[in-house]
Amino acid sequence: MTKGGLYIPMPEHVDMFCSKPQYVQCHQYLRGCELLKETARKYGFIVEGGRRKYRRVSDRTTLTLSACDSSRNFLELLDDNAFTVDLSLGGLRLQSNKEIQKDSLVSFQFSPDFSIPNLSGMGEVKWCEPVADSDNFQAGVAFADFELTQAIGSHLGLPMM
C-alpha cells in the first residue's frame, strides 16, 4: 500500500483484479474513482441536480467509429469521419452519417491531432436522432471504462488525471 505516490500491485492482486472483470471491486480502482469524483466536483465538472451527471464541454474532434460486440471485437466500420459535438467525463455526443442502434456498443478512436493522440475507447449508445435539415445523425455514447474517463478529464483540463 502507499501513502501518496505510485501503487505497484502484487502478482496476487493482478490475478484477482487487474486482469478480470472483478476490477471494479479493487480498492485501488475504487479509490481512483473517488479521487476523480472529488476533483471533478471541485472544478465544476459534476453537475449537482438536474438530468445530467457531468457538465458537457463543446469539443469538435474527428473520430473513427466502429460497431463492436460485448467482448470488444470489431464487427464493422460505421464511419471514419464522425466527430464529437461535446464531451463530458461520462461520455460524448457525436455526429455521424450513420444511424446507430440505441443500446449497441461502439468503439471509437480519436484522430491523431487529439490532445492524447489516437486515444480509443468503447461505449454504449444511449440515444440516436437525425439532425434537422441534414442526412446526419447525432448520438450520445456513455463511456465503458474509467481509463477513458481519466483521459477525457485530462483533455478537458481537469487536474490530477
Image: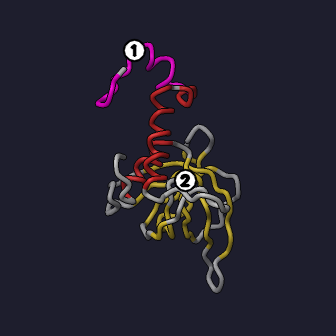
Position of 137 with respect to 35 (left or right) is: right
Amino acid marked by disc 1 = Pro
Q: Is residue 88 left or right of residue 75?
A: left
Residue 148 image point, x, y percent: 46, 47
Q: Can residue 82 be seen in this snapshot?
A: no
Residue closest to the eye, 9 or 44: 44
How far apart in space, not on screen, are marks 2 and 1 (Cα)?
A: 31 Å
Q: Dot 1, how many residues are within 10 Å of its Cα: few (below 14), some (14-19), or many (20+)? A: few
Mark on residue 90? 2
Seen in the picture, residue 34 relative to 111 is either above or below; the reply is above
Q: Please indicate, yes or no, whether residue 102 appears anywhere in the rendered image.
A: yes
Magenta region includes residue 5: yes
Residue displayed at 62% across by 72% down? 137
> Which residue, given by chain and number where applicable, does mark 1 sit on?
11
Check the image and report above or below for 62 versus 31.
below
Instruction: Locate residue 11, reporting x and y percent.
Output: 39, 15
Region of the chain picked out in magenta, as a range: 2-20
Q: Nearer the viewer, residue 61 or 42?
A: 42
Residue count near mark 2 (Cα–Cα under 10 Å), binned few <14, some 14–19, many ≥20:
many
Q: Residue at x 41, y 58 (%)?
A: 110
